Amino acid sequence: MQATFGPVLKNWREGRRLTQLALSGEVGISQRHLSFLETGRARPSRATVLALARQLDVPLRERNEWLVRAGFAPEYPGTTIDEAAMGPFRMALQSVLDHHEPYPAFVIDRRWNPVMANAAAMKFFARYVDVAGLLNPDGDFLIIRSCMAEDGLKPHLENWSELMGALLDRCQRALLIDPMNEGLRRVVEDILSLPDAPLRPEHGALQPVIPLVFRDGDERFAFFTMLAGFGAAQDVTLDELKVELMFPADDTTRRAMAH
């Protein structure tokens, strides 16, 4: 397992655009020792693995993988959201979803699959797709892929090209944080390979946020979204869960959702 740690460390360091000198100085080890770690000529201590991972802002799931690759036991638990120990956090998530009514809200996991949703989200998205099919923790970027699909949300999104451009930006920013995420990399490649590639707004036409604009016959709904997560998470699951809240972007949508 030790031999597999060095290349992963090197990939993350280069992904963060850091030299060996810069990273070693921040962690408090010599550049020579860091070079030996990357080539497999030296074995890191557990503390060094964790210090490097923290400095490179490696997500908790990958920090566990680093430890295993270096020959140590994982550091961070990965409790599923349905386990009893997650009760207070599950209640907190449900409370946020419930208090966001009558507007849609989801809890999404590391692969951007909705794993929880409030009643408003279930009712609203049922206009367009099979909502039960979106709530799948074993899926792969289901919301984004539904936005890309002709039998999904794509035909119902009035500003599809602009929205996909925003989602592409979001995915690419996420890759800067998690550069070894192959699923995320595939999503970026799939968006870029679309025949009707997404547009990026010109600088002079920038809005505060890019809305999601749905069209259902004569009815039009516009939303903007906000993301929230747990602070200082020390559990892999909690570190990865995010709440996505949808807010009305105009008075027409606000009135429609209220009724």
Image (cartoon, rainbow, N blue to C red):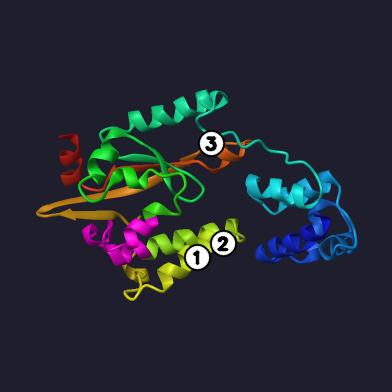
Residue drawn at point x = 68 percent, y = 38 percent: 76
Tell me the number on the disc at residue 182.
Answer: 2
Upstream in the sequence, badge 3 or badge 2? 2
Q: Residues at badges 1 and 2 in contact (C-beta under 8 Å)?
A: yes
Where 156 falls versus 65 (above or below)?
Answer: below
Instruction: Name the residue carrying label 1.
Output: 186
Most foreground residue, 80 or 224 = 80
- Locate residue 176 relative to residue 124 in the image: left or right: right
| Structural crowding at the residue carrying mark 2, measured as other residues with C-alpha within 10 Å and reported as few (<14), some (14–19) or many (≥20) | few
Going by the numbered disc 2, the residue's amino acid type is Glu
Quadrant in the picture for the C terminus:
top left
Can see residue 259? yes
- Locate residue 209 relative to residue 218 in the image: left or right: right
- Locate residue 142 relative to residue 128 in the image: left or right: right
Q: Which residues are magenta?
A: 144-164
Instruction: Name the residue carrying label 3.
Output: 230
**Of labels 3 and 1, the one closer to you:** 1
Q: Residues at badges 3 and 2 in contact (C-beta under 8 Å)?
A: no
Residue drawn at point x = 73 percent, y = 41 percent: 74
Where 118 falls versus 175 (above or below)?
Answer: above
Going by the numbered disc 1, the residue's amino acid type is Arg
- Residue 8 appears in which quarter of the rendering? bottom right
Tell me the number on the disc at residue 145.
Answer: none
